[in-house]
Image: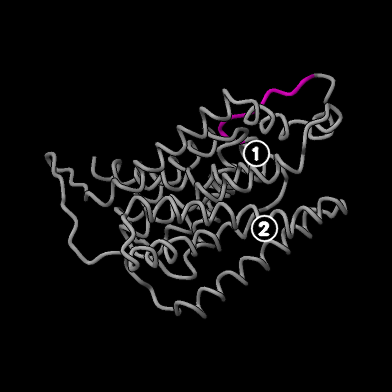
């Protein structure tokens, strides 16, 4: 039971990263590697605000807003000009990777290269039979579930959210209908960055943070998106939960050194046996 709980908590965080990645990739087809840099940067801004005596909740909100603005800035300054020039996907990937490297190096210049922690006190542990969960271990997943619930409601019930979903299906038709494609792309980058900020601070509060933590977690989010299949929310979350349970099993029965190998073995199996992912989309006859 302890393995399942650990896997679910880890899977929720991985799935949320997958949601953040999918929000950009499904709508703009940008392989948003720079999201890893924003993931790394967010805890540093959060702890800096705490040192200025900001309340925890206000530090979280301000950090999220700053990271959201930076996500929008990446789209406006890098990917929007490339979109207007009809640049191929690999150019966007290289540009995003370059942005990630710049962000990480700026973190190292201003805050150093060492791992850090948010707070010093020992977390309270809750026990139920043979299952034990630290209070801080629950903080990130609970915040993430709340944030994803808000995003899901917005995508389903707001005009902008419906347009964003339509952008992932047919951006050309949406433009012909007079919708502002640039605004929708910026919104996708903005929401994605805000969500990744919440995930990052939740993980940092429990485990600490470092400048290079972002790339590994973004790769996990990409894998969750791929094996999850079609969709913004449920597919990446399902992929994340599957990855979380697998990685928890590997650590419990084997060694943490095999986590990454098990992750990408699962990815290869999906690519060969079920390339459409867990949630496969139905294809119209005329599109075949």
Disc 1, disc 2: CB below 8 Å? Answer: no
Q: Is residue 197 rendered to the left or right of residue 166?
A: left
> Which residue shows up at 40% across the image and 36% down it?
146
The location of residue 248, given as percent across then percent down, is 35, 50
Report how far apart the C-alphas of labels 1 and 2 lie in the structure: 30 Å
Which numbered disc flags the more N-terminal residue, 1 or 2?
2
Q: Is residue 185 rendered to the left or right of residue 150?
A: right
Q: Main secondary structure of the magenta part?
A: loop
> Which residue shows up at 58% across the image and 35% down it?
232
Q: What mark, if any, has residue 74 been given in the picture?
A: 2
Q: Which residue is mark 1?
A: 275
The location of residue 246, given as percent across then percent down, is 41, 46
Q: Is residue 226 rendered to the left or right of residue 84?
A: left
Residue at the extreme top of the image, as rendered: 285
Asked whether 150 or 66 is in front, the reply is 66
Q: Is residue 225 magenta?
A: no
Vertical placement of 58 versus 16: above or below?
A: below
Q: Is residue 281 magenta?
A: yes
Instruction: Decide: few, some or many residues near mark 2? Use Cα within 10 Å; few <14, some 14-19, many ≥20.
Output: many
The location of residue 219, given as percent across then percent down, is 55, 56
Picture quarter with the C terminus: top right
The residue stretch that appears in magenta? 277-284
> Which residue shows up at 48% across the image and 70% down it?
211
> Which residue shows up at 30% across the image and 41% down it?
4
């Amino acid at each position: 039971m302890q393995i399942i709980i650990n896997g679910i908590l880890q899977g929720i965080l991985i799935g949320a990263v997958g949601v953040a990645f999918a929000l950009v990739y499904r709508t703009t087809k940008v392989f948003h590697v720079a999201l890893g840099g924003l993931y790394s940067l967010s805890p540093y801004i959060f702890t800096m605000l705490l040192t200025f005596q900001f309340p925890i909740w206000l530090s979280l909100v301000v950090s999220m807003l700053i990271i959201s603005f930076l996500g929008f800035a990446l789209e406006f300054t890098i990917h929007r000009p490339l979109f207007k020039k009809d640049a191929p996907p690999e150019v966007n990937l290289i540009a995003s990777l370059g942005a990630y490297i710049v962000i990480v190096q700026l973190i190292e210049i201003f805050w150093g290269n060492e791992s850090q922690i948010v707070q010093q006190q020992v977390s309270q542990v809750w026990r139920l039979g043979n299952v034990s969960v630290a209070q801080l271990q629950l903080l990130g997943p609970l915040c993430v579930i709340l944030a994803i619930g808000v995003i899901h409601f917005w995508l389903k019930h707001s005009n902008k959210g419906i347009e964003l979903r339509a952008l992932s299906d047919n951006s050309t038709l949406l433009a012909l209908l007079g919708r502002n494609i640039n605004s929708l792309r910026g919104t996708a980058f903005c929401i994605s960055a805000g969500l990744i900020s919440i995930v990052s601070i939740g993980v940092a509060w429990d485990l600490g943070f470092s400048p290079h933590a972002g790339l590994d977690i973004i790769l996990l989010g990409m894998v969750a998106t791929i094996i999850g299949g079609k969709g913004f929310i449920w597919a990446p979350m399902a992929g994340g939960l599957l990855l979380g349970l697998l990685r928890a099993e590997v650590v419990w029965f084997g060694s943490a050194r095999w986590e990454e190998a098990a992750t990408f073995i699962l990815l290869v199996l999906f690519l060969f046996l079920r390339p459409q992912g867990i949630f496969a989309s139905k294809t119209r006859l005329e599109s075949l």
